[in-house]
Image (cartoon, rainbow, N blue to C red):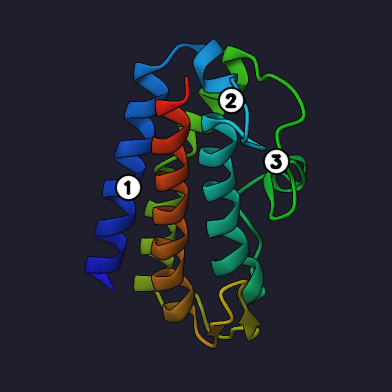
């Protein structure tokens, strides 16, 4: 699984560069034809990783319930975020992935509640979830690249 975690970390570095190289106004802008903005997409990937890997394994997530409710599947941008809120999201890019790597190495993930994702793939193991998470984050990287062109 080292390769899968490496991919996740590389994608998160790209997300970090979007945060660092765009203004707060640009991060918050929802261009015409889109439902969400750059910062929502980044926060959504953080939340989804925790839901797919920790919640479906029956383990506590590393995020607040408020963050999960704001960025889970089915949500959309509701308001502009403050710089402090963006900084919190930026601060959560890497620590949950490092904790997941550690927990995986320590065999913390003992059970997994089967889940069928929107692409109709069924996740049966935490390994499936880690691999699917990379696909999911790639989709949102694509959205972010499209959003950036629309700024």
The correct choice, above or below, for 34 with respect to 68 in the image is above
Residue at x-position 59% and y-position 20%: 29
In what element is the residue under mark 2?
A: loop
How would you rate the neighbour count of disc 1 (Cα within 10 Å): few for under 14, some for 14-19, many for 20 or more?
some
Q: Reading the chain from its start, which is encountered first: label 2 or label 3? A: 2
In what element is the residue under mark 1?
A: helix
Which image quadrant is residue 130 in?
bottom left
Where residue 37 appears, x then y in whole percent? Answer: 58, 31
Alpha-carbon distance for marks 1 and 3?
A: 21 Å
Which image quadrant is residue 14 in?
top left
The correct choice, above or below, for 103 with respect to 71 in the image is below
Dot in front, 1 or 2: 2
The correct choice, above or below, for 62 with respect to 3 in the image is above
Left or right of residue 42, residue 102 in this image: left
Give the residue at mark 3: 67
Q: Which mark is residue 31?
A: 2
Residues 44 and 50: in front is 44
Alpha-carbon distance for marks 1 and 2?
A: 23 Å
Q: Reading the chain from its start, which is encountered first: label 1 or label 3? A: 1
Rendered-image quadrant of the N terminus: bottom left
């Amino acid at each position: 699984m080292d390769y899968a975690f490496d991919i996740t970390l590389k994608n998160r570095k790209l997300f970090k560069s979007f945060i660092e190289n765009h203004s707060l106004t640009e991060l918050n802008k929802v261009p015409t034809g889109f439902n969400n903005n750059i910062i929502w997409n980044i926060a959504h990937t953080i939340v989804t990783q925790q839901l797919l890997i920790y919640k479906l394994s029956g383990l506590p997530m590393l995020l607040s319930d408020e963050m999960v409710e704001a960025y889970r599947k089915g949500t959309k941008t509701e308001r502009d975020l403050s710089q402090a809120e963006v900084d919190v999201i930026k601060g959560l890019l890497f620590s949950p992935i490092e904790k997941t790597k550690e927990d995986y190495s320590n065999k913390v993930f003992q059970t997994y509640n089967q889940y069928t994702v929107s692409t109709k793939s069924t996740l049966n193991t935490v390994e499936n979830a880690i691999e699917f998470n990379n696909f999911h984050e790639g989709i949102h990287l694509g959205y972010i690249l499209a959003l950036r062109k629309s700024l």
